[in-house]
Image (cartoon, rainbow, N blue to C red):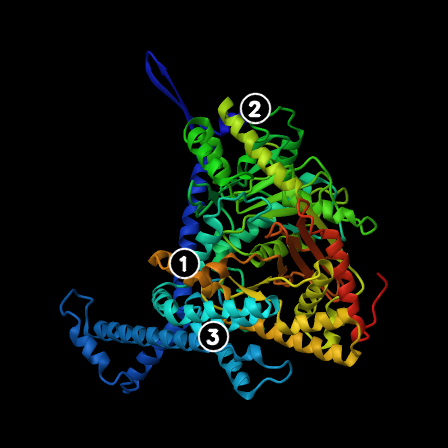
Amino acid sequence: MAEAHQAVAFQFTVTPDGVDFRLSREALKHIYLSGINSWKKRLIRIKNGILRGVYPGSPTSWLVVVMATVGSSYCKMDISMGLVCYIQKCLPEGCGPYWTPQTRALLSMAIFSTGVWMMGIFFFRQTLKLLLSYHGWMFEMHGRTSHFTKVWAICVRLLSSRRPMLYSFQTSLPKLPVPSVPATIQRYLESVRPLMDDEEYYRMETLAKEFQDKTAPRLQKYLVLKSWWATNYVSDWWEEYVYLRSRAPLMVNSNYYVMEFVLIKNTNIQAARLGNIVHAMIMYRRKLDREEIKPVMALGIVPMCSYQMERMFNTTRIPGKESDLLQHLSDSRHVAVYHKGRFFKVWLYEGSQLLKPCDLEMQFQRILDDPSPPQPGEEKLAALTAGGRVEWAQARQAFFSSGKNKAALDAIERAAFFVALDEESHHYDPEDEASLSLYGKALLHGNCYNRWFDKSFTVIAFKNGQLGLNTEHAWADAPIIGHLWEFVLGTETFHLGYTETGHCLGKPNPMLAAPQRLQWDIPEQCRTVIESSYQVATALADDVELYCFQFLPFGKGLIKKCRTSPDAFVQIALQLAHFRDRGKFCLTYEASMTRMFREGRTETVRSCTSESTAFVQAMVEGSHMKADLQDLFRKASKKHQNMYRLAMTGAGIDRHLFCLYLVSKYLGVSSPFLAEVLSEPWRLSTSQIAQFQIRMFEPDKYPNHLAAGGGFGPVADDGYGVSYMIAGENTIFFHISSKFSSSETNAQRFGNHIRQALLDIADLFQVPKSDS
């Protein structure tokens, strides 16, 4: 009962003698410390806002300018060219005994210095934006940097030499440019040429020319106007129409999963793993709030946009009948936890202090030891987030808009993130290849009701201590959650650690209030909706075939000996594997990032090119000389790398056409060309997983500290989803998904073709391989 009393700040009793108040000093202390902590956060944000707003300037540089102005005045030099005297004349006279001519002179010099300082900041910031608009360095051969690029790099380093905060570069990043319509049309036609016969291509070329000459100029004007007005002409529409307006289930169709270290094990104790991991995540959130995280920099000098990080924590996707909404809170002091069909609320702080890992371990262990059964309808409640969005929106409005159901749902939706304590065990056993696929399946969809798919991310802890993430896609792309995950795993392993028995370090506080069980009152009608959503989600999950494997013969190190980029090598291998698997080529999607621009997200690289298909056909024919095949491969690789660079620098195809299509819909303009382009299925959807964004440790010293990447469901019903991580110098992890309901696809068969394609291409260059 002491724990319950601590949760109430005061109690009162009405008696004949009046009202008797009983205050809880401990609870009031927590409220007081919480308020202090909240004000500290506000002050930190104000300070960071000022420092970010004057970057690349600083308060120190302002003081230097003021001292230089004052010093020149005492040396009888007027560097202001009369402006200080003019400002002094404009200041009022006789405002008090301290308002002397000397005071007015100092104030006028301070005003002048501040103006000069602010003009300097504006000039340097615009200069930096102009410098960051140059992308010629991306198109230069490795080791053949031009003098112009070298001078450019020196200038960028000079202007960004002061230690930046996370968002310091945001206002200096250039806007995403709108490509010209003829350039986009030309690149589009070039991309579909290998997929069409002459008759089909001529028809598409005619549609494209008609669109370019008649419809496109009007649409382009509106798009250019938006690019002038908006921060990014793509991102808001992309988020709304690709993610939030989709009415399909999030599970499998949108959410993706992330694995952890698979070759090492810190501890087998489920609660202990979570104690360290959750503590490390809140450490990261604190750094995020204080903007102490370094911006991600390409080549160590070109900043990437960081805006997607803002909604990493305290974010939930709220279902709507026509469109969902992303709800982001400035702070949250608890996490929501699911275990054996029950929901709990676990506080992360005691007063203003973040709970230690050992305290968090104790709290999670209390949940694991709790024998209470689920309330009626509670066990499968999260299936609502796995089913159709319209059904979930209707149920939310009908059954969760008031009373204890609203309070419990608020506790989940307002949590920093969601935690799932699973009862089954998963891990990767190199001797049992299927173990990695089972691990991935459990992360992708679980049992369809033990993940809250609407949360920005769910931390999943299996019974044996293995971990993973299931991540909602609308708020950010995979490299963002990857950045968090690298920090968390590195902090857990190299900074927090465990005792010899596998528990978190330190002694827990047994007086902490136990986790709060969420209370529900779920009527029979709601349980019917929950069961219906569960059936939809189960059918979807059961249809997913997932094949994950570790490719051991070689990795990035030996690929580079072929004098090509590892990504181009893998993408061309995927084209060869797909042709062997299906006997034809298909429209291929590879995600690239556009984060060199403000609020940039992704662009599509159309990996199936005329050059790659020429190489694949030559390989399949088997009658070409090795030298000819090498030449064809290099041409395909060069083409792919060029397309990737164009996509990253704002000269892609698909985001431009997507926005033109939306403008046409807004204007009520019909375009057969755009309608056909936007309806083309991506039967091979691919993505490379970023790694080592943060140097938490040296990979060469710890070669087994490898996360296995992550994966996603197939985009097309008769297609494949492929993600891969080129994990260091000697291995590659692949995650391949397809649907059992399609007779044309088989994830394991395609995986075997990928293996063979990689080996066959390596043989062309006589790259020695280790034993599989």
* Other residues around mark 1 within 10 Å, as few (<14) / some (14–19) / many (≥20): some
Q: Position of residue 618 (x, y in %)?
A: 74, 73
Badge 3 or badge 1: first in the primary sequence = 3
Question: Can residue 519 be seen here?
Answer: no
Residue 692, image x and y in percent? 64, 63
Residue ID at (60%, 68%): 197
Seen as rendered, the residue at the extreme left is 94
Amino acid type of the residue tagged 2 in the rendering: Gln
Foreground tag (3 vs 2): 3
Quarter of the image with the N terminus is top right
**Label 1 to label 2: alpha-carbon separation:** 46 Å
Q: Quadrant of the C terminus?
A: bottom right
- Name the element at disc 2: loop
Judged from the image, the secondary structure of the residue bearing numbered disc 1 is helix
Q: Give, as a three-letter code, the residue at label 1.
A: Leu
Nearest to the observer: residue 581 or residue 433:
581
Q: Quadrant of residue 87?
A: bottom left
- The residue where tag 2 is placed is 375
The amino acid type found where label 3 is placed reads: Ala
Residue 514: x %, y % from top left: 58, 31
**Residue closer to the observer: 345 or 633:** 633
Q: Residues within 10 Å of mark 2 (few under 14, many from 20)?
A: some
Determine which residue is flagged by label 1: 662
